[in-house]
Image (spheres, helix red, strand yellow):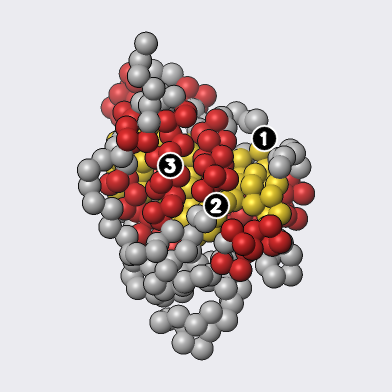
Amino acid sequence: MSKPLTKADFTNEREVRWCPGCGDYAILAALQKTLPKLGLPPEKHVFISGIGCSGRLPYYMNAYGFHTLHGRAPTVATGLKAMRDDLCVWLITGDGDGLSIGTNHLVHMLRRNMDINIILVNNQVYGLTKGQYSPTSPKGMVTKTSPDGVAVDALNPMMLALASGASFAARGVDKDPKHLGELIEASFHHQGTSFLEIYQDCHIFNPGAFDAFSTKSNREQHVDYLNDAPNDLSRAMELSQLTFPEHPVPLGIFYREAREGFKLENNGHKKRADLETLLRAKASFKVEA
C-alpha cells in the first residue's frame, strides 16, 4: 500500500518570498493542503505561470513548473496539455498578466475547453512593478499611474470568462482558506477548462481592498455563497455583475457544464507521425502578374 500524500509532499525547501501579509501565502497554503486529497503524486502536477507576484508560485511547489513570459502562460499550458494529457496542468496568472497582455491567450484557452485549471489571482493592482493600476482596478482608484483616479470602468474577470465560453467558473477569497480549498478541489475534478478567480490582498499597494466583505467577521453579512452551480449561463452572468456594497459578493461556483474540449486527435492529428509529415510537407504557391 502506498503512503498517503500529505502537504509536505508538495512543499519544497525554497524560502517563500512575498511581502509580509501578501494573500499569495494563503493561496499557496490552500494548494499545498488540497493537492494531497486529489490522489496524484507531485510529479503528475505542473504549475505554469506568467509574470507578476503570482508568477513566483511554481518555485514554491514541489512539482514540475514553468515560469513563462508575460501573458504567455496559456500558450505554454495549452501546448503541454495537448502533448501530455496524462499531466494535471495548473495555470497561475494575475489580473495584470492574464487580463492585460495575456487576455487574447486566456480567452482562447477558455474557448478550447482543454482540461486545464486556471487560477487567476486578482488584487486589482500591479504589485510586482510597484503599484500601477491594472485592468481590474476600480474606477476612481488612485495609483502611481492614475494620480487623479482610474478614468474607466474595471474589467470584470468573471463576465469575461463566461462570455469566452468557460465551462467552469468560480470565485473565492484568500481569507477563507477552507472554502478556497473546496473550490480548488472542484476545479481539479471538472473535465474541461476550469476558471477560478481569487480575490487576493496586496498588502503593500492595495491593502484591505476586499476586507469589507472578505474577512471572517464580514463574510456572514456581505457574502452570498453559491451552494449549487446550475447549467444556466444567463443566471451566472447576472451573478457576475453583482458588486459590493450594493449587493453581497457572490463566492463559489457560478457555472459548470460538462462539455467536450479540444484534443489533437479530434483535429486530424491522431499520431505523432502525422505532425512529422505535416512539418516536412512541401507547400508552395505561385504569384502571377
Q: Amino acid at mark 1?
A: Glu
Q: Amino acid at mark 2?
A: Asp
Answer yes or no: is residue 225 visible.
yes
Instruction: Please determine whether, in this image, residue 150 is positioned above or below residue 263.
Output: below
Q: Residue at x 69, y 62 (%)?
A: 222
Give the Cα distance between marks 2 and 1.
25 Å
Nearer to us of marks 2 and 1 is: 2
Query: Of the numbered discs in the image, which one, if any, rests on residue 133?
Result: none
Q: Amino acid at mark 3?
A: Leu
Give the Cα distance between marks 2 and 3.
13 Å
Instruction: Please determine whether, in this image, residue 57 is positioned above or below residue 191.
Output: below
Disc 2 residue crowd, few under 14, some 14–19, many 20+, Cα 10 Å: some
In the shown orientation, is residue 150 left or right of residue 218?
Answer: left
Q: Outermost residue toward the top?
A: 1
Q: Residue at x 35, y 15 (%)?
A: 2
Q: Quadrant of residue 259?
A: top right
Nearer to us of marks 2 and 3 is: 2
Disc 2 and disc 1 in contact, CB within 8 angstroms? no
Q: Residue at x 38, y 26 (%)?
A: 5
Instruction: Please determine whether, in this image, residue 40 is positioned above or below residue 285.
Output: above
Pointer 2 residue: 176
Give the Cα distance between marks 3 and 1.
24 Å
In the shown orientation, is residue 236 left or right of residue 15?
Answer: right
Pointer 1 residue: 257
Question: Nearest the camera: 199 or 120?
Answer: 199
Q: Which structural element holds mark 3?
A: helix
Query: Of the numbered discs in the image, which one, if any, rests on residue 31?
Result: 3
Residue 7, x across and y down, in percent: 37, 36
Disc 2 and disc 3 in contact, CB within 8 angstroms? no
Answer yes or no: is residue 90 visible.
no
Residue 29, x across and y down, in percent: 41, 46
N-term-proximal mark, 2 vs 1: 2
